Amino acid sequence: MNNNILEYKGYRGSAEYSAADKIFWGQLMGISDSVTYEGNNQSELQADFEAAVNDYLETCAEIGKPPEREIRTTETTNNDIQLRRSYATI
């Protein structure tokens, strides 16, 4: 786990620890569908995360729904620049 983010097949997921429950848990990031996973240690968390991604993709295929993808970009557009400039003048 790097910076509490897991990655697999283009999906990213959180990695948290619940001291109260003594379990690692997380959820897929950047999509509206709720996909969660858990494990007793980091290795189990990674394995369950990968299984959750595979299950999500299989379920989407079975019901004929395109799987959501997180939209990530590092490009700065002209709109971004104009928006930043407008905030700077406020």
Image (cartoon, rainbow, N blue to C red):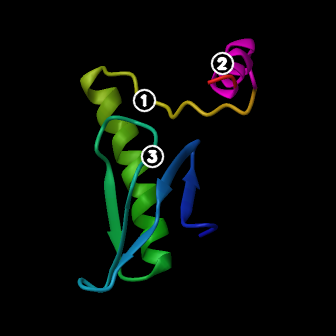
Q: Earlier in the sequence, mark 1 or mark 3?
A: 3
User: Would you say 24 lies left or right of 72 here?
Assistant: left
Q: Are marks 2 and 1 in contact (CB under 8 Å)?
A: no
* Marks 2/1: CA–CA distance: 32 Å
Which residues fall within the magenta stretch? Answer: 76-88
User: Would you say 63 lies left or right of 72 here?
Assistant: left
Which of labels 1 and 3 is toward the front? Answer: 3
Amino acid type of the residue that numbered disc 1 sits on in the rendered structure: Glu
- The local crowd at label 2, few if under 14, some if 14 to 19, many if 20 or more residues have their Cα within 10 Å, is few
* Marks 2/3: CA–CA distance: 30 Å
Residue 37 position in % (x across, y down): 33, 61
What SS does tag 2 mark?
A: helix
Which residue is drawn at the image coordinates 47% and 54% (left, top)? 13
Q: Are marks 1 and 3 in contact (CB under 8 Å)?
A: no
Which of labels 2 and 1 is toward the front? Answer: 2
Outermost residue toward the front in this view: 90
Q: Is the residue 32 above or below the residue 65 in the image?
A: below
Residue 75 part of the magenta-drawn span: no
* Marks 1/3: CA–CA distance: 10 Å
Residue identified by numbered label 3: 29
Residue identified by numbered label 1: 68
Residue identified by numbered label 2: 86
Which residue is drawn at the image coordinates 40% and 36% (left, top)? 31
